[in-house]
Image: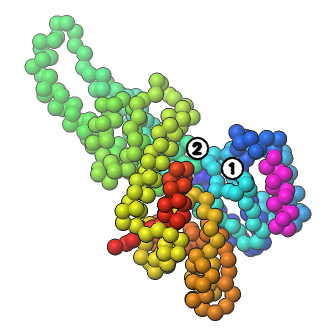
């Protein structure tokens, strides 16, 4: 799993390593018919030969693939003489023919795509006995047992008793009726304070983990009350509310399965709304979008998940969709380069948010918007 610590390690330690380094990205999904019989090993051997990887490094990588069958959808390998780093991912990478490799400077573009495309999602499992929090990221799930650790067992017990309501014996019904309103007011005030406290603990964890979106899961009434009591800045992050699972002790995998059923349709819907906004007030086309991006006039850049265009980089670093445009930015060697390789660095250089679209939205972007678009800052 490529964890938060793993991505930090790649950026801080792998990227600055002295070249040459092998950067290898593979589709190893066992559900893909093209991977039957470990066909990805053959593809890897062919690409390593094509980029003239040293035999020592190639041997090390091929041995790792032969003897360790990945139980993942993608595998990322960084290697050089004397060291190798391997990461298995439960998500797809933007690869052509299932493999992409570079020998030289560390090549991080596919990793940067993942970091831009996949946000960390917090799942709050509301249960009467004890609440649980999970983090979903890159197709995997991790329970965060410390999220509500500050809440004592007695407080959870009181919440459980209050949620079940107060029961009275037959002889005490009339005596209890007179105090019902007062009791309900006290109960409401206590629950309000308790939920507000849980919201504070939740926000602290979200900030620590850089979690951007939330899913609330549990009994409908409890979920609705908690959502309404969240501060607006947290309530706006809630993208879905789901019914509870049959048992409060559900395994993390069961929670992940339920959440994934709604996440992908929601993401595809969000992407199509983004393209609607692009059609209404955005710019489109490779040349125009790149021009405005490098003028600092776009706050959002919308790109296909697997862009296949070539672009041209002038000696001063300017990137254009045509050779003529690059030549206009100064004499010298014009470099032709894959668009996918320069998009993350261009977006970062100009403080522009980068959004990728997949599936039907990607096809629409390519057909109706020329493969690239953006929303202006003003």
Classify mark 1: helix, strand or loop: strand
Residue 244's spot in the image, x, y percent?
Answer: 42, 29
Residue 58's spot in the image, x, y percent?
Answer: 85, 60
**Residue 165 located left or right of residue 302:** left
Number of marks drawn: 2
Disc 2/disc 1 C-alpha distance (Å): 13 Å
The magenta segment: 39-53
Residue 317's spot in the image, x, y percent?
Answer: 59, 83
Residue 67's spot in the image, x, y percent?
Answer: 84, 45
- Looking at marks 2 and 1 on the same chain, the residue that comes earlier in the sequence is marked by 1
Labelled pair 2, 1 in contact (Cβ < 8 Å): no
**Which mark is drawn over residue 140?**
2
Q: Is residue 81 visible?
A: no
Q: Is residue 336 visible?
A: yes
The answer to whether 294 is drawn above or below residue 102 in the figure is below
**Residue appearing at x 26%, y 22% in the figure:** 165
**Residue appearing at x 78%, y 62% in the figure:** 79
**Which mark is drawn over residue 74?**
1
- Crowd around label 1: few <14 · some 14–19 · many ≥20 (10 Å): many
Q: Main secondary structure of the magenta part?
A: helix
């Amino acid at each position: 799993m490529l964890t938060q610590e793993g991505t930090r390690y790649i950026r801080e330690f792998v990227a600055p390593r002295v070249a040459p380094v092998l950067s290898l990205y593979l589709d190893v999904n066992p559900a893909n018919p093209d991977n039957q019989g470990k066909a990805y090993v053959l593809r890897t051997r062919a690409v390593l030969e094509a980029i003239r990887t040293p035999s020592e490094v190639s041997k090390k990588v091929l041995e790792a693939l032969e003897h360790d069958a990945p139980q993942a959808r993608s595998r990322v390998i960084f290697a050089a003489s004397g060291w190798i780093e391997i990461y298995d991912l439960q998500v797809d990478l933007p690869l052509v023919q299932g493999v992409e490799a570079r020998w030289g400077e560390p090549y991080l573009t596919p990793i940067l795509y993942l970091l831009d495309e996949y946000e960390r999602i917090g799942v709050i499992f509301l249960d009467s006995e004890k609440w649980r929090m999970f983090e979903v990221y890159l197709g995997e799930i991790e329970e965060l047992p410390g999220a509500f650790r500050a809440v004592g067992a007695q407080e959870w017990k009181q919440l459980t008793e209050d949620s079940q309501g107060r029961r009275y014996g037959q002889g005490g019904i009339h005596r209890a009726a007179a105090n019902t309103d007062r009791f309900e007011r006290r109960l409401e005030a206590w629950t309000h304070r308790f939920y507000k406290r849980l919201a504070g603990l939740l926000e602290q964890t979200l900030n620590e983990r850089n979690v951007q979106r939330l899913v609330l899961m549990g009994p409908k009434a409890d979920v609705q009350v908690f959502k309404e009591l969240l501060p607006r800045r947290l309530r706006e992050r809630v993208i879905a509310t789901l019914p509870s699972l049959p048992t409060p002790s559900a395994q993390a995998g069961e929670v992940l399965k339920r959440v994934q059923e709604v996440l992908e349709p929601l993401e595809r819907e969000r992407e199509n709304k983004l393209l609607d906004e692009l059609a209404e007030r955005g710019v489109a086309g490779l040349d125009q979008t790149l021009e405005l991006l490098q003028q600092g006039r776009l706050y959002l850049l919308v790109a296909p998940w697997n862009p296949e265009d070539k672009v041209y980089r002038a000696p001063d670093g300017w990137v254009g969709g045509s050779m003529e445009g690059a030549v206009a930015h100064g004499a010298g060697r014009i470099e032709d380069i894959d668009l996918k390789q320069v998009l993350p660095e261009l977006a970062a250089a100009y403080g522009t948010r980068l959004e990728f679209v997949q599936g039907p939205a990607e096809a629409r972007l390519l057909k109706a918007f020329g493969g690239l678009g953006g929303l202006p800052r003003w």
